[in-house]
Image: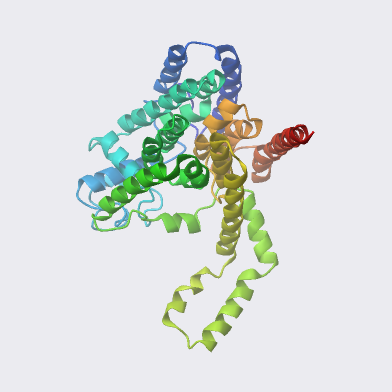
């Protein structure tokens, strides 16, 4: 409640968030051996302080509530964007607060079910924020149960989940707690339950699909059967409402861009190679020689720099995920690496996306992603003017120290691996 309105007083907000991050690191060191109940109580109290605060830096929760009202009225949010006259009457006060009113919902079936559960037909975000705050406290419990007292305490006090889950009401905490539950079941050799948890997590947000290879390798056929079976049932059940739950996912994947350094670099590479124009010329030649098939007309909108840059990053990400899935043997480490790779190669990296990597970084004490989670709120300066913080400065403050820390972490890991191999062969 004491946090200033971030849109109008962003420098003060950033200073408070930064101070809270330093205090979280200090508290984690002091309370790493504290009783689990005390840490969870602290996590709950911190989140309760922002439950009654109106979200100010993100409008996502209002889209959640609008989706819930549309579904309650008997329409599919994957079929009707807010600008569709068929549903514009459903919740006009919510609709007025929504950006991208021309795009259908991008949220999967489990997320949509959570929106219905947490809204109870109302238009106030408080109950929905409480649901995601409870999921966030569940993350603290799972980290403590895993044996990471430092990780649990750090996540409990960390300002990012407090402000983005309980404060802004982002659904990511629900997906993260389900993913961690899946990994806990995997560690306990309960593969079928792990598959269920993984499917529920992936259908809350699609982020965990990046870690499909390591979890499938660990879970085996029981994991695959239970997870795929549940996912198919939920997906088909949602599609019975008349539209694919993919909704506006392609629009998001092809249009959204925010706070990335790899995507602008990829655009520059594609542009310097004149790749779209060269590809279009080759395609036109092929089209001429094959009699102008009708389907080729649908291809032409994609000959532009941004689409080719996304395709390039997607291809590089696929190779990297395959390498992680093949080379990193420990499941949680491979999951962490896969999620981190996905976030870095994505054209869009909002601060709350880092909630997916924060539990792993906290329990492992991994400096690069911990640093990024602490400075990620700086990216709001890309949306709201902040004196003294240009785009160049913001991206430099975020990514230059992050890159150095990540390089140091990878170098240490490689050194340990080479040392272990030398000892094994001696």
Nearest the eye: 178 or 216: 216
Q: Is residue 13 above or below residue 97?
A: above
Q: Residue at x 39, y 42 (%)?
A: 222
Q: Residue at x 33, y 33 (%)?
A: 128
Q: Residue furthest left?
A: 74
Residue 316 percent location from the top left of the image: 61, 55
Nearest the eye: 193 or 335: 193
Q: Is residue 152 above or below residue 122?
A: above
Position of the C terminus by quadrant: top right
Position of the N terminus by quadrant: top left
Q: Residue at x 42, y 23 (%)?
A: 47
Residue 77 percent location from the top left of the image: 30, 51
Is 416 positioned to the left or the right of 321 in the image? right
Q: How many discs mark residues in the rendered view?
A: 0
Q: Residue at x 32, y 54 (%)?
A: 78
Q: Residue furthest front?
A: 426
Is 296 positioned to the left or the right of 387 in the image? left
Residue 39 percent location from the top left of the image: 47, 15
Residue 377 percent location from the top left of the image: 56, 35
Q: Residue furthest right?
A: 426
């Amino acid at each position: 409640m004491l946090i200033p309105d971030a849109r109008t007083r962003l420098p003060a907000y950033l200073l408070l968030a930064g101070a809270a991050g330093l205090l979280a690191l200090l508290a984690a060191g002091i309370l790493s051996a504290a009783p689990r109940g005390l840490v969870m109580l602290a996590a709950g109290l911190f989140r309760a302080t922002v439950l009654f605060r109106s979200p100010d830096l993100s409008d996502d929760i209002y889209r959640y509530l609008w989706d819930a009202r549309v579904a309650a009225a008997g329409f599919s949010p994957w079929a009707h964007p807010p600008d569709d006259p068929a549903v514009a009457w459903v919740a006009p006060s919510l609709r007025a607060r929504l950006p991208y009113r021309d795009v259908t919902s991008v949220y999967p079936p489990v997320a949509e079910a959570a929106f219905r559960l947490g809204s109870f037909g109302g238009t106030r975000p408080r109950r929905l924020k409480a649901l995601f705050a409870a999921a966030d406290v569940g993350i603290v419990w799972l980290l403590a149960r895993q044996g990471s007292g430092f990780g649990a305490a750090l996540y409990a006090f960390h300002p990012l989940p407090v402000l983005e889950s309980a404060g802004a009401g982002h659904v990511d905490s629900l997906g993260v707690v389900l993913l961690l539950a899946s990994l806990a079941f995997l560690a306990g050799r309960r593969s079928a339950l792990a598959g269920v948890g993984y499917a529920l997590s992936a259908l809350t947000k699609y982020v965990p699909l990046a870690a499909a290879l390591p979890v499938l390798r660990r879970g085996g056929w029981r994991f695959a059967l239970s997870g795929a079976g549940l996912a198919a049932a939920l997906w088909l059940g949602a599609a019975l409402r008349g539209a694919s739950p993919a909704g506006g996912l392609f629009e998001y994947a092809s249009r959204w861009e925010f706070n990335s350094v790899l995507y602008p670099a990829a655009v520059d590479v594609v542009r310097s190679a004149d790749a779209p124009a060269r590809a279009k010329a080759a395609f036109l030649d092929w089209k001429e020689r094959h009699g102008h098939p009708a389907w080729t007309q649908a291809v032409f909108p994609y000959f532009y720099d941004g689409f080719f840059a996304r395709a390039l990053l997607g291809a590089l990400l696929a190779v990297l995920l395959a390498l992680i899935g093949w080379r990193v043997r420990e499941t949680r480490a491979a999951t962490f690496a896969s999620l981190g790779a996905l976030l870095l190669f994505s054209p869009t990296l909002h601060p709350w996306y880092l909630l997916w990597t924060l539990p792993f970084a906290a329990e492992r004490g991994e400096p690069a992603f911990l640093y990024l989670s602490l400075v990620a709120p700086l990216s709001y300066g890309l949306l709201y003017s902040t004196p003294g913080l240009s785009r160049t400065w913001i991206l430099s403050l975020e990514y230059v120290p992050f890159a150095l820390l990540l390089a140091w972490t990878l170098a240490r890991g490689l050194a340990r691996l080479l040392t272990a191999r030398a000892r094994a062969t001696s």
